[in-house]
Amino acid sequence: MKNNRTVAAVFLLFLAAALPAHAQSLQSITQTAQTATADGAASQSRIDKLDDETDTMTREYRAALKQLASLREYNAQLEKLIAAQKTEMVSIRRQIDDVTNVDRTIMPLMFRMIDALEQFVTLDVPFLASERKARVANLRAFMDRSDANPAEKYRKILEAYEIENEYGRTIEAYEGEMDINGETRTVSFLRIGRVALVYQTLDGDESGAWDKAQNQFVDLNGDFDSALRSALRIAKQQAAPDLLVVPVLAAQ
């Protein structure tokens, strides 16, 4: 019995001596495990960070590829546009050369047209003489303008010709001045196309008509005073339209 107690006491002493060492070892293991766990968490964090960075770089790379494809497509379109512009420039240069050649041909023609128009106005029945001569003078001035191209100049000449052409199809009444027996008087003119040009003083006492043969106005001696008063009122839209009776002097 005593021996058993002794053994028990020895075992307890051994156990008491071993427990601190075991606890110290267990604590060391626990600390090692905790350190390993912390290191593992840090490693996992670094792995997660690297994974995120890899995803970001992958997205950026794919975006860069798309942008590169877009740039290549844009450059291809730009090259087509540049090629088209070069072709257009060649065409424009050719057109400029053609216009230059046309200018050399058409400019003398336009000056001849103006000369012919001026001569026509000079030889025509002298209605609105100042206005028509001023139109010709304006054409000559317009031809000297450097800011007007040949097409604009030609259009102006055609407009002047059209105006002259319209005179032959219209009836017009207007006031002007003329010399009657050495006295400048205001009269009413009546133009019937280019067939007749007559005048009457504002008081209606004197009337005359253009005589192409004599190239001057001649006195009508009161033969058409009443008829001309009526015709002037109709032409001025002061009376209802009616048959016009005017003198027509036949060329000799």
Image (cartoon, rainbow, N blue to C red):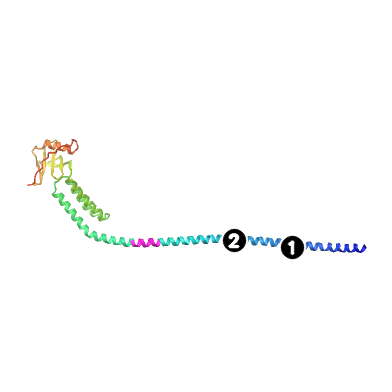
User: Going 67% across and 62% down the picture, which residue do you hit?
Assistant: 40
Q: Can residue 135 be seen from the camera position used here?
A: no
Provide the residue span drawn in magenta.
78-87
User: Going 69% across and 62% down the picture, which residue do you hit?
Assistant: 36
User: SS class of the residue under badge 2?
Assistant: helix
Q: Is residue 237 left or right of residue 40?
A: left
Residue farthest to the left, as pictured? 252
Gap in angstroms between the C-alphas marked 2 and 1: 32 Å
User: Going 90% across and 63% down the picture, which residue do you hit?
Assistant: 4
- The N terminus, quarter of image: bottom right
Spot occupied by residue 242 in the image (x, y as percentages of width and height): 16, 37
Q: Is residue 86 left or right of residue 150?
A: right
Q: Where 196 sits versus 8, above or below?
A: above
Q: What amino acid type is highlighted by mark number 2?
A: Asp
User: Going 74% across and 63% down the picture, which residue do you hit?
Assistant: 29
Q: Is residue 108 left or right of residue 251?
A: right
Q: Which residue is mark 1?
A: 29
Residue 245 lies in magenta, yes or no? Answer: no
- Looking at this view, is 177 or 239 the one in front? 239
Q: Residues within 10 Å of mark 1 (few under 14, many from 20)?
A: few
- Looking at this view, is 204 or 168 the one in front? 168
Spot occupied by residue 34 in the image (x, y as percentages of width and height): 71, 60
Q: Which mark is residue 228?
A: none
Q: Main secondary structure of the magenta part?
A: helix
